[in-house]
Image (tube, grey):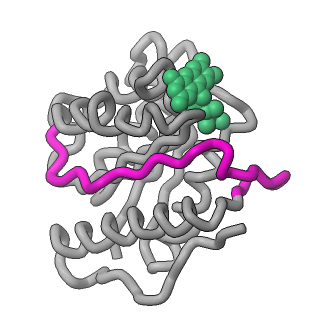
Amino acid sequence: MATILTVSASPSPTSKSAATRRLVDAHLAGLGHHVHPLDARELPPAALLGADTGHPAIAAALDLFARADGVVVVTPVYKAAYSGLLKTLLDLLPQSGLARKVVLPLATGGTTAHVLAIDYALRPVLSSLGSAQIVQGYFVLEQDITREPDGGAVLAADSAAGLTRAVSRFAEALALHHGAGFAPAEGYALSAA
Ligand SMILES: Cc1cc2nc3c(=O)[nH]c(=O)nc-3n(C[C@H](O)[C@H](O)[C@H](O)COP(=O)(O)O)c2cc1C
């Protein structure tokens, strides 16, 4: 079993990215992994913007990064890139903050015209942080996400299938990087509408 940090990074209190992250959390937990979710909007804003790495909440977040075998990042597409909130968090990591970690980049967005934001905007940043492997990402169209009152999400069938494949590839890459001790279970899929 792997230790996995899942990060959602939307400033919205009704974030579809956070709801999508919860689906991924459940999927990975269902595979037997230790999942530590982090919603960046819950970090103290002044400490985050002030790069106060000594603040207990910021230090705890950075510790989650340090201890993770794998990291899942879920960002909304903002202005054809990832969110500023995500950047403020990633900027606090050391230069090799993702070394030896497998990373899954995920995005939600309003138009498929920006599906490539994962690859031209997010992937280079994750790469510069030294990730051992950045697996193929996945973009979820916001119209395909129904946010539930409890903060969870239901996805349209095609998006649920695509996200399931992306998470499975991530789990397989983790198993390859960190040994066969947490090989993905078979037959597990995200629920769809
Ligand atoms: C400030 C802002 C900028 C946005 N820019 C884009 C964009 O460039 N491309 C896109 O596809 N969607 C864009 N969107 C739509 C969001 O990506 C989409 O609504 C997303 O699912 C929001 O996720 P969230 O609910 O987690 O914040 C933008 C939304 C906002 C609020």
Left or right side of 177 for 119: right
> Where on the picture, by quarter, is residue 172?
bottom left
Q: Which percent across, then down, holds residue 191?
A: 64, 72
Q: Which quarter of the rendered picture does the C terminus lie within?
A: bottom right
Name the foreground residue: 189 vs 9. Answer: 189
Say whether residue 15 is visible.
Answer: yes
Considering only vertical position in the picture, is 152 above or below 76? below
Q: Which percent across, then down, holds residue 134?
A: 23, 50
Residue drawn at x 42%, y 39% is 115
Considering only vertical position in the picture, is 50 above or below 175? above
Say whether residue 10 is visible.
Answer: no
Highlighted range, magenta: 130-153
> Where on the picture, by quarter, is residue 32?
bottom left
Q: Which percent across, then down, holds residue 14?
A: 74, 37
Q: Residue furthest front?
A: 113
Left or right side of 52 for 159: right
Dividing the image into four equal quarters, which quarter contains ligand 1?
top right
> Where on the picture, by quarter, is residue 108?
top right
